Amino acid sequence: MSLRTPSVRVLSAVSVVAALALSGCAGGEASSTPVPEAADFHATDAWVKAAPADEMTAAFGELVNDGDNDITVVSATSPAASMIELHETVQNESGQSVMREVEGGFTIPAHSTRELAPGADHLMIMGATAPLLAGEEVAITLTFSDDSTAEITAPVKEFAGANETYEGGDK
């Protein structure tokens, strides 16, 4: 019996050490959280076209993804607007350039950019809450597909272009 007792003690000790090691590994995996999409995002050269109150205008610039995974901007808000939509500019059946809301948002590939420019993708600012005058700044909050958010600040500039027709109903 004295030969079995040390074996049982050794076996018990090995079992306890193994269980602690395994639970430590499992705990490490469970505590790791994915990086929010907003953490890998920044914008460059952002700006907003000047506009009177209650008018539509747009925000432009470069959306940058520094991360290893694609990220998707799904919506935007601003105290300067009653609503913001993510828009693209396309040719309609008669060959006219028209703006329309983008389904699914703006995806920015890993380690890449997405340009927002007059006559192309842009943030459509609808119902400006006050005149947007050159030299002012507009704060815009972007929401990503994982519900994380990032705020950008864009100066307001005079710009004669970006006068496409909106194809979106009564908005």
Image (cartoon, rainbow, N blue to C red):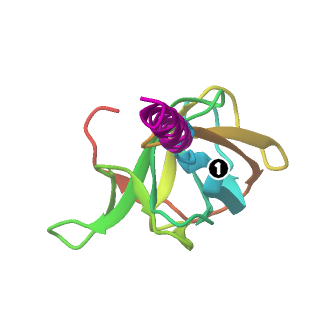
In the rendered image, is residue 39 in sight?
yes
Which residue occupies 28% across, 49% down?
A: 103
Q: What element carries label 1?
A: helix
Identify the image quadrant of the N terminus.
top left
Decide: is 130 above or below 133. Answer: above
| In the image, farthest residue toward the right | 135
Quarter of the image for residue 157 reads bottom right
In the rendered image, is residue 147 in sight?
no
Toward the viewer: 84 or 119?
Answer: 84
Q: Is residue 140 rendered to the left or right of residue 147?
A: right
Residue type, label 1: Ala
Q: Is residue 128 rendered to the left or right of residue 89?
A: right
Q: Is residue 41 rendered to the left or right of residue 114?
A: right
Residue that carries the numbered disc 1 in the rendered image: 39
Toward the viewer: 165 or 150?
Answer: 150
Identify the image quadrant of the C terminus.
top left
